[in-house]
Each structure stands twice: as C-alpha cells, then as structure tokens.
Amino acid sequence: MIRWDSVNVSFGPVKVLGPVSLEVGEGEWVGLIGPNGAGKSTMLKAALGSVTYDGSVVFSNGRRGPGRSIAWMPQRPQMPNDMGVFDYVMLGRTPHIGYLGGEGRHDVDSVRAALEKLELVDLADRPLDTLSGGEAQRAVLARALAQEAPILLLDEPTASLDIGHAIEVLEVVDDLRRGESLTVVTAVHDLTLAGRFADRLVLLAEGLVQADGSPRDVLTEENLTSHYGAGIRVVDDEDGPTVIPTRRSNG
Amino acid sequence: MSSPTTPTVARPSRPGWVALTIGVVAVIGVALVGLLIGPAGIDPGAVFLGLADALPLIEIDHGLSDVERSVLFEIRFPRVVLGGIVGAVLAAAGAAYQGVFRNPLADPYLLGVAAGAGLGATIAFASTGEPGLLAALAFAGGLGAVGVTYALGRSVGGRTTTSLILAGVAVAAFATAVQTYLLQRNVETLREVYAWILGRLTTVGWSDVLTLLPYALLASGVMLGARRLLDVLSIGDEEASALGVNVSRVRWVVVIAATLATAAAVSVSGLIGFVGIIVPHTVRILFGWSYRVIVPLSLLFGAAFLMAADVAARTLVSPAELPIGVVTAFFGAPFFVLVLRTMRGPQ
C-alpha cells in the first residue's frame, strides 16, 4: 500500500505538483498518465524522498526504509559503461546487504531470478554500454525487481521497448503483482498500453489529478483532448479503450 | 565487430588471483630492491643475508658491520616502508575521491589538502624550519583547508558535489596566494619550500612511519570497507539513495578518512603528485571498473609504484637525489599514456 496525502512540490517559486492525494492498495496497479510536465515523475520521486514536499507519503513497511519498501525504476537511469549486467542488477540487492556486508547466496538467487524473468540471462556478462536501448531498459527493471520490495514505482518502463517486448515486460510485472500482491504504480505515455494493464488510471495535468477511475472512465475523448491539447479518438471494444491520434488539419 | 573499446564480456567485480598475486609480488620485489640499493654501497648479498638474519628463528652470519646494519635498518628500511605507505595511501585515496565525486580527474588534493599543507609548510620554514613543526603545520594546514572547503561548499549550496569542488578551487587559490606572499617575504626559504613541494622521502626514520601508520590503517580500512558502496554511488546520488544508501554520509566518511591519511602522508613526505591519479586509473584500465577491484589493487600498486620511484630518485643521479615528485611524473606520465594507448586501442 502507498498513499500520497495532499502532497505539494515546488521547485523554487514554481509549483510542479499538488495538492494531490492518491492511495494505491496492495495488489493494485495504478497507471499515472498525463502530458509532459504534468508531475508524474515528481509524484514518484516524492515517495522516494528525493524531492522535498509538503504533505505526507505513507507506505507499508515504511519503517524498514524506502530501499526495502519501494523499488523505483527511474526514467533516465545513470548506467556506468563498463559495469556488467549481473553486477548492475545486483545493485538492486543493496538495501538487503549491510553497509559493510557482502552479497550472499540469496542475493545471487534473486538476481538470477530477475534476469530470467526479463530474458537477460544470456546478457548477464555484457557491459552495460554494449546493450541496446531495450536491453538496457530491461536491465533497469531487473534491478528494481531484484529489490524484492512490496511497492514498485516504474517511471516509463516501456519507453525504449518495441511493442512485443513492452507487452512481455508489463506481463512480467502483472504476474508478479498478482502472485505476490505487489503495489504497482507506473507512469506511462502509451495510453492504450496503460489502459490494458492498470486496474485504475489517474490522469495528472498541471500538477493536479484531473481524473481517477477505470481505464474506460478516464480514457475518454473529452478528457484526453482537453488535457493533451491534440486530436485524439478513442475506440472502445472488448479489449478496452484504444487511443488513436488524429490530425486536426485532416479532420 | 568487437574492438578493444567495446569488450563483450564485462570485467569481474572481484580482484582476480592473478592481479592480487602480481600486486603482492610487486610490493615485495620492489621493497627488496629498495633495501638492496643505496648510496652507502653495502654489498647487496650481505644485505640480503642481513635481512634474513633479522627474521625470527633464523640466524645467519651476514658479515654486515654495525654501521652498515644501522644504515640498513635505521635509514633504508624505514624509507622503503614509508614510501610504500605513502604510495598506498595516495593511490587508494585518489581512487576513493574519484568514486565519491564520480569524477575521473579527482585526486586526493582535490579539496585543497595540497594547498593548505603547502601553506602550513611555508609558515613552518619561514619560522624555525624544525621538522616536527613542519609536519604539524602541514597536517593542520591540509585538514584546515578541507574543513573550510566543506563549510563553504555547504553554505553555497545544495546537495551537489559541484559546489564543493568549486569551493575547493577557491580555497586552494586563496591558500596558494597567501603562501606565495609569504615566500616573497621570506625568499631565503624558497629552496626548502620548493623541495618540499616536489616531495621527498629523505631524512626519514621510523618515527615518520609511526606517525603515519595509524592514519594509513584507519583510512585503508574505511576505503576497503566502502568499496562496494563506491560501486553503488556510480549510479548517481538519487538512485543510490533510492536503494537505501545514505549518500552524503558515505561520501563524508570516505572523504574524511582519505583526507586524514592524505594530510598525514603529505606532512611527512611533501606533495608527491600524480600517484593518486595514475595508479587508480592504471588499475581500472588493466583490471576493471569495480571499486571492489580498484581500491585493494590501488593500495598494492600504489605502494609498489612509489617505492620504485624512490629507487629511481635515489640512484639515477647518485650520490645526489632527484625529488620523488619529479620521478613520479617523469616516468609515470609516459607509462600512463602507454597504458591508455595499448588498452583503449585506436579510436
């Protein structure tokens, strides 16, 4: 469980988020959507404590520290060139290894499991700078999964992935959250994809929650057109809503 | 298409047996050479037997006179050991600074230790020039400068290390300005101060080794203990904090330990340059990216490198001596370029 209570974030005089309140329960998947600069990443960072905010963020297991409770997949991770994939994913075990400790068998097993889930086993020995964009992104997600935290905050987890890998990766996350009752919050730009996987979508714009509900309730032409400021058509069928960009000049 | 620039297999994050063995053999080998060679012209064979005789449970007739024995054990031996400790400390401190600041150009003098120690040494030479005072003022000057850098860096801002590094630049410039003024006022000390700045392991005895040893042990322990955390810091402050690492605490503990040892080393040996940059980078290029490899191997290869440089300093223009800082740069720089070229390949 994770809950944002009237959270406000300002960078100097510029208010970028808030007040927002949102609760995501155990086993629930919430997709944060919204245009660039809406405050999606900032909201995730408030939970990590890496931006200063007013209000409060509460999460289960909070006393064990954010590293053990929350696994965060950053949108723009810093990946050291020469580091190997296995060692990179092992960094995710840091919260479980004491400051002066070394990694144990359980840590190695967790890393292997994460590599297997994301089909990175064959790349385990490759330096990070030899990976393709999609492979690198899977490595970052593997690092987050290796943390084995009850809450997953994923900032654009599929941005560099082709559609096949995007679906595969989100299915891995979906299996995990169902199997282990993880709390999942993703910030995703692909609205159709977001609607296929999340139980609930939260539309953020200008730092505020503009809509909150099932994908069908939130992904409406009216909501999207007014907040994204572009021509958007939504087709709803048995798979759920599909978002189709249109060109206003052609319309 | 694989070129030397893009290896397809990442280097391991543990030092291999081969690298550790080479390091240990290099330290012992260079130390032996340092003990066997010197201006006193003692027969190397006799030195060897004399050393063996000094080992517990071994008694050998070595044929060294009492004077030769005391040259060996009171002059050469402490000098070799001191060179080893100073080299190990400077190289590992350089590696640690590069890790916590995530800056390949960082060296242990980054935050003003060198300039502060230089100012302290200049004050000492301008007053009495007594060795005890020199070491004390150099040590205090080095630590004081870093303390001011830290206070300034914190006051100007933020959590970034950039403000800290820039504060270090300002403090170093200020200390150097004061030092230059003092030198102008006391021109007669110019030669001594200049010789000190170039570094020296001359006129040392066991007391210098004993002064330095606790700082060196403490710093080595902290830097070795933090080697895995230095790898975590390589993904940036924000991500490392999200993994539960208290980044600023780790940074400060490592910097304080490395700075204490550097200031102590500088106070007994002067400003030996270059070791803190080229040794960790050479280790990194040859043996891998991980600080779990770089920190322990920098300790070993730093010790071997500085002891070797001291052998060269003592012998090349014998009976005179070259300043050791000149040797480290004169031989270190071409060697470093060679390593860079062979390992990185044509770009």
Image: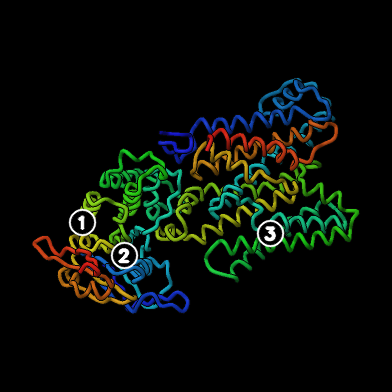
Q: Residue at x 24, y 60 (%)?
A: A182
Q: Label 1 lies in what chain?
A: A
Nearer to us of marks 2 and 1 is 1
For label 2, the crowd category at 10 Å Cα-Cα, with few meaning under 14, some 14 to 19 and many 20 or more, is some
Residue under the image location 65 percent in, 38 percent down: B303
Q: Is residue A27 visible?
A: no
Residue kind at label 3, given as amino acid type: Leu
Q: Secondary structure at mark 2?
A: loop
Q: Between marks 2 and 1, how big is the CA–CA gap?
A: 21 Å
The residue drawn where x is 88% and y is 61% is: B185
Q: Taking the image as drawn, is residue B209 in sight? A: yes
Give the SS element for disc 3: helix
Q: Is residue B135 left or right of residue B249?
A: right
Say which quadrant the N terminus of chain A sits in: bottom left
Mark 3 lies on residue: B143
Label 2 to label 3: alpha-carbon separation: 42 Å
Respond whether the residues carrying marks 1 and 3 are from the same subunit. no
Total numbered badges shown on the rendered structure: 3
Q: Which mark is residue A174?
A: 1
Q: Residue furthest right?
A: B188
Query: Rounded to the nearest whole Å, what is the CA distance between mark 1 and mark 3?
Result: 54 Å
Instruction: Answer above or below: position of A2 versus A166.
Output: below
Residue A90 x %, y %: 38, 47
Numbered tag placed on residue A61 in the rendering: 2
